[in-house]
Image (cartoon, helix red, strand yellow):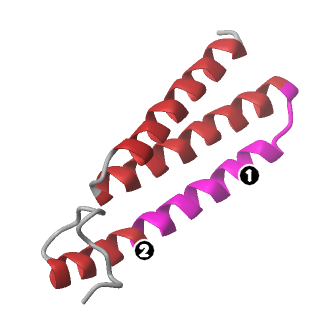
Amino acid sequence: MPTFYYLILSFVLFLIGTTGVLLRRNALVVLMGIELQLNAGNLAMLTYSRALGDEKGHVFAFLIIALAAAEAAVGLAILVGLFRNRQTINLDEANLMKR
């Protein structure tokens, strides 16, 4: 398959993730959108890495996967704490500065 198809898929995935981050107010959907954006970046990086014959892209993709796992763990821990205190994960209702 040509690299163009992989790059188009990466672009579409990134747009879907960006739409989820910008338009949704549910914190879980926002976290899923961020994960989708990171995976789209990984796909583009691996596409270029394969096209150029360089293995460094695979190493960076692995590091981004580790970063995404850490982001998911910390983000979910924050959401669990937020839900325990506020009984909601809606980002509009969950303003921590208010008392």
Pick the front one: 73 or 25: 25
Give the total number of marks visible in the rendering.
2
As helix, strand or loop, the secondary structure at mark 2 comes to helix
Pointer 1 and pointer 2: residues touching (CB < 8 Å)?
Answer: no
Q: CA distance from mark 1 to mark 2?
A: 23 Å
Residue named by callout 1? 59
Please provide the residue range marked out in magenta: 52-74
Residue at 34%, 77% in the rendered image: 78
Pick the front one: 81 or 87: 87
Choose the circle earlier in sequence order: 1 or 2: 1
In percent of width and height, residue 18 lies at 49, 40
Q: Residues within 10 Å of mark 2 (few under 14, many from 20)?
A: few
Residue at 38%, 53% in the rendered image: 30
The answer to if 79 sits in the magenta stretch is: no
Residue at 17%, 69% in the rendered image: 88
What secondary structure predominates along the stretch shown in magenta? helix
Residue named by callout 2? 74
Q: Of the residues shown, which amino acid type is indicated by label 2?
A: Val
Q: Of the residues shown, which amino acid type is indicated by label 1?
A: Val
The residue positioned farthest toward the top in the image shown:
1
Q: Is residue 40 above or below residue 24?
A: above
In percent of width and height, residue 95 lies at 31, 75
Question: Is 3 left, or right, of 23 in this rendering?
Answer: right
Image quadrant assignment for residue 2: top right
Residue 91 circle label: none
Question: Is 81 left, or right, of 35 in this rendering?
Answer: left
Q: Quadrant of the N terminus?
A: top right
Residue at 57%, 62% in the rendered image: 66
Pick the front one: 13 or 54: 13
Q: Residues within 10 Å of mark 1 (few under 14, many from 20)?
A: few
The answer to if 63 sits in the magenta stretch is: yes
Question: Is 52 left, or right, of 9 in this rendering?
Answer: right
